Structure formats: structure tokens, C-alpha cells
Amino acid sequence: MIKKHNFSAGPCILPNEVYEKSAAAILDFNGIGLSLLEISHRSKDFVAVMDEARAIVKRLMNLGDDYEVLYLGGGASLQFAMVPYNLLKVNGKAAYTDTGTWAAGAIKEAKKVGNVDVVGSSKDKNYSYIPKDFTVGSEYDYFHCTSNNTIFGTQMKEFPEVDTLMVCDMSSDIFSRQLDFSKFDLIYAGAQKNMGPAGVTLVVIKKEILGKTGRENMFSMLDYSQHIEKESMYNTPPVFPVYATLLTLQYLEKNGGIAAAEARNIAKAELLYNEIDRNPNFDSFCVKEDRSLMNVSFKLNDESKKEEFDAAWKAAGISGLNGHRSLGGYRASLYNAMPIESVQVLVDVMKSIN
Ligand SMILES: *Cc1c(COP(=O)(O)O)cnc(C)c1O
């Protein structure tokens, strides 16, 4: 099988080994004569998957027993509502940064739960940079940010010191770079950008932050405490996405962990950004210092070359390079599983444009 060079922003490319092992598990899981898709989620074979999928996250992130790991349904989008529902005190307020479409979505949902202040925004400049000039005091119940803006292609290189809880949507750069994860009180990420197939969302929570809102009689499915108590099996979990995510994380751990992934991601992004900066046909959408290692957004300076460029990358076996409809241009997503050889194919195509 000849695979394309998949630069899609999500669902994402995964390691070949993950496709092979998860395909095999659909036919016969662990040699038990049953498919992964037909066994009980309470069976010992699946409970072992869930336990390990939760444990490996803490190992990779270097987090202790004060954190809990959950695999939930509903996408990162459901976390836009669950975060304020679980952390925003009745009559309290939360601080958000507005750095792109997803951040704005999180703000919109949080406002339905309570009071929200937008303490930093780059909306005025079409989200082409990361706002840094703000402070967040203890009058806020939590601060929410988006570490990587998938659509516009900016990324927070540093995180502010805040005087409250730190919550981060890491959907599109989770496990792509080393961070002090213990600085965060809650991290969430839809799996399908950098860690698995669509259908499951990772939530990492510092346990002690829960149960402080004064909100009573919470919906059980929206209550992190209930999911923690049931070890992420309050209801039937999305078994296949959890398993494929576990395989992806095992592959990551085996291949040098986050540190090695980060080194590969830096090399890939440098290769592409160097060409964008060097080649007079192309330009970035974003300011240099905030450019993402994961989603590289760029455009042609001369739209009359669009036909030639589009034909050339398609002929080279490249897929998923068109920019998001709200930005236009191009976007090359360089998630963990993207090999540098594929980035080189794209760079060679860019060099070939007159
Ligand atoms: C894709 C994305 C989301 C939405 O994820 P769903 O799982 O589709 O709900 C949220 N935040 C960021 C940063 C994203 O890239």
C-alpha cells in the first residue's frame, strides 16, 4: 500500500504500528478469540487497557498521584462546558484568553455557566499572535488558555504565572513538547489531533481542585468526580479510541518519550519554516515568535500561482494541505507521527514553484 503524505489538521496521522495493531485487535483481541469491539468494557482484558491508558499519561507527563486521568466522550468541545461547570463557582468568575476559533468556542460556552473575563485577545489582528500582556489575580476561579491554535497556527511558547488554577486546552499539541505539566491543574485534549482517533478526549485533573463550586445536584455525566470515582468507566467508554490512543502513547514511550518527539517536531517545523522564510513565493500568516510547531499556516504571495502549486503538491502525493476555510491559504500539520521525509517532499514541491 502506498500511503499519502497526510498533512491534515485532524483527525491526524498516526504511527503505522498503531494502524496495524489496532486493526489486528478488531479481528482478534489479545488472542482471546473475540474482537476488541465485542468484549465487555468490564472484562479484564479491557479494564487492563483502560488502567494502562490512564497510567501511561501520568508517566509521560511526569505527574504524581495527586492527578487523575480520564477518557471521556463528547470531544474537546464538551470540555468547553464541563470545565466551567466543575470549576466556576456559583457567582465566581473565570479568566480566558481568546487566541482563535477554539478559544472563542470555549469562552462562548463558559459564559453560559457564569461570569467570564477575556483577559487577553488577538482577535483584532486575525489571531496572528499570542497575547502576553496581562495578569490574572486570585479573584478568578481559574484561568483558561489554548496552548496551540490549530486553525491559525500560533502556539504558546511560555505560559503565564497566574494566581489561580491553570486550565489548558492542549488538543493540538499534547505530547508534542516537554512542559512542566505539574503547573497545570486541568489539561484536556481531543485525541484526534495528536494522540489517537476521534471519539475520545483526554482529561488530566489535579484532584484537589474539584468540589468547590457550590453547584449542587450536578449531572453525573458532566461531573469529573463521578468519572474519577468510576475509574473512567462511569458509562461504556469509547473502547476502540481508548485502545488506539494507548497504542499511540506506547509507541511514543518506546521511541524516547516526549523529549524525543519534541526534537523531531522542532526539526520538521524548522525545515518547513526555513523554506517559507526563504522562498519569495510564500509567506507566514503569523508573527515569527509565536509560530506553531504543529500547524504551519502559510500562503502564496501571488495567487496566480495557486493552480501550479496545488497541482504540484497533489502530484507529489500530498493530502490535506488546504488551509481552514476561515483563513484560506495552506496549513501543514506536523503532528508527532508525521515523518520528516514527508515534510521534505513538501519543501521540494515549494522549491519547484517558479
Ligand atoms: C479540534 C479542536 C477542538 C475541538 O475538538 P473536538 O474533539 O472536535 O470537540 C478544541 N480545541 C482545539 C485546540 C482543537 O484543535
Image (cartoon, rainbow, N blue to C red):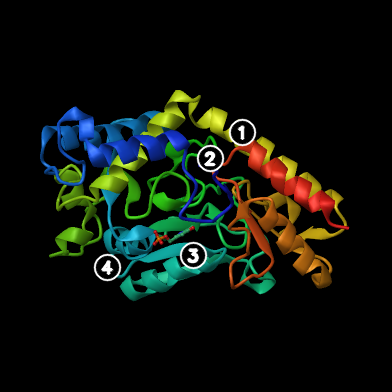
Q: Identify the disc placed on residue 264.
A: 1
Residue 124 versus residue 331: which sits nearer the camera? 331
Q: How far, Cα to Cα, is label 1 from label 3?
A: 26 Å
| 295 with respect to 83 (left or right) | right
Instruction: Look at discs 2 and 4 and give the one toward the viewer.
Output: 2
Question: In the rendered image, which quarter is residue 70 located in?
Answer: top left
Residue that label 2 marks: 336
Residue that label 3 marks: 102
Mark nearer the N terminus (2 vs 4): 4
Asked if the residues shown at circle 4 and circle 1 are in contact, with their CB atoms under 8 angstroms apart, the answer is no
Residue at 16 percent of width and 64 percent of height? 219
Asked if 316 appears above or below 112 in the picture, the reply is above
Q: Is residue 152 visible?
A: yes
| 298 with respect to 50 (left or right) | right
Q: Position of residue 267 (x, y in %)?
A: 68, 36
Q: Residues within 10 Å of mark 1 (few under 14, many from 20)?
A: many
What amino acid is labelled 2 in the image?
Answer: Asn
Q: Position of residue 22 (x, y in %)?
A: 33, 39
Residue that label 4 marks: 90
Mark 3 CB lies closer than 8 A to ligand 1: yes
